[in-house]
Amino acid sequence: MRVVLFVAVVAISGPTWVYYRPYRESRRMPLLLGFGLVALFIWCAENIGTFAAVWVYPHQRHGWQPVHFGKYGSWFLLMIISFILVSLVHPPRLPQQAEAEGVLQPETVGS
């Protein structure tokens, strides 16, 4: 079933871009790349947490082993659900629309 979900996600959101503004300049990134990177960082943090024995999974009781890579897929799907829920509360806008609505401050030249 997971494979079907991943194929559907790629088919539906493959050509989608997300805009973000880390400081003053708006940038864009493929949405699937963003989901993949966040899921990878969470999976790495999970490995760090289990290595430090903050929590231990049953297969790690007799010594540390990396968290199964299958969990990466779970984090990836969680990112999609989280993104959908947040976009229901804060509908997506293009950077130009957000500036026109006063959500983003216009860029200032030379500052």
Image (spheres, grey):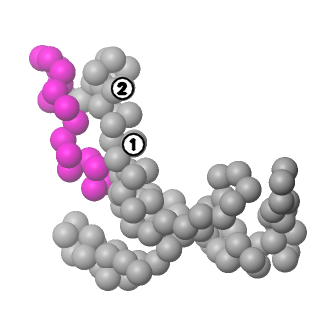
Q: Is residue 55 left or right of residue 101?
A: left
Residue 62's image quarter?
top left
Q: Find disc 1 in the rendering and name its residue.
A: 41
Task: Give SS at disc 1.
Answer: helix
Residue at image location 84% in from the left, 65% down from the top: 106
**Amino acid under disc 1:** Phe
Residue stretch rendered in magenta on the structure = 59-74
Q: 46 or 60, which is in the foreground?
A: 46
Q: Is residue 19 left or right of residue 47?
A: right
Q: Find disc 2 in the rendering and name its residue.
A: 49
Residue 78's image quarter?
bottom left
**Amino acid under disc 2:** Gly
Residue at image location 76% in from the left, 78% down from the top: 97
Residue at image location 65% in from the left, 52% down from the top: 22
Q: CA distance from mark 1 to mark 2?
A: 12 Å
Circle 2 Cα neighbour tier, 10 Å, few/some/many (<14 / 14–19 / ≥20): few
The outermost residue toward the front is: 110
Position above or below: 55 against 109? above
